[in-house]
Amino acid sequence: MTTDKTAMDAAAIRMGVRGRAAGRGGRDRTGGFTLVELLVVLVILSLVMGLVGPRVLSYLSSSRERAARLQLQAFSSALDLYYLDMGRYPTTSEGLQSLVKAPPGQDKWSGPYVQQGQIPMDPWGFPYEYRTPGRTKAYAITSLGSDGRRGGENDAADIVSD
């Protein structure tokens, strides 16, 4: 009986069906993915990315806008503390740096007024602009958006504190 089984195994190996007998899903050892199978997978992946990609990118841009608005609020709070200590807001030439380092000749300054120890860049990597007076408040802080220039639309639009 063992010789019959050995003969059957040898015949199966010669016929290339050993992989099927071993439970390898119908493929032999030389098998791989066919071009059609690869193309089907690529089409499915591109459809998924076409649907998911724009949604993920919109979340990314809206989160940057929210982060910029939160930083503007934090600067406003720090500027109010500066005002309480100094009796005035920083001048345009002193800028937001006066929240970190005392302007020359100011002995009432009791900062730094921001926790980072430096003024952070906006979420797109550009510096915030500070000017006094603002249009509706005593000051205005501006993030120029993703393009780093005045004006713009969508995520390139300016974000202004006043």
Image: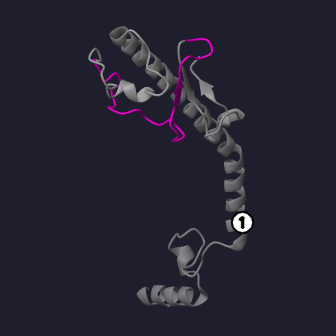
Using the image as rendered, state which of residue 100 and residue 10 is in the foreground: 100
Instruction: Judge whether residue 78 is colored magenta.
Output: no
State whether the magenta stretch is mostly helix, strand or loop: loop
Residue at the image point whose x is 40% and y is 11% from the top: 83
Local crowd size for mark 1, using a 10 Å CA cut-off: few (<14), some (14–19), many (≥20):
few
Q: Position of residue 135 (x, y in %)?
A: 63, 15
Left or right, residue 115 beside residue 151: left
Front-lying residue, 147 or 88: 88
Indicate left or right for 82 with 148 as reference. left
- The residue under the point 67% across, 49% down is 49
Instruction: Please state which of residues 82 and 92 is positioned toward the viewer in this rendering.
Output: 92
Q: Is 145 situated above or below 48?
A: above
**x, y percentage for residue 110?**
27, 17
Q: Quadrant of the C terminus?
A: top right
Q: Position of residue 59 (x, y in %)?
A: 61, 35
Residue marked by disc 1 = 39
For image coordinates 37% across by 15% down, the residue present is 82
Q: Is residue 64 left or right of residue 104?
A: right
Q: Amino acid at mark 1?
A: Leu
Q: Nearer the viewer, residue 136 or 57?
A: 136
Which residue range is magenta in the image? 110-137
- Does residue 84 lie above or below 45 as drawn? above
Please, which residue is most extreme toward the front here? 105
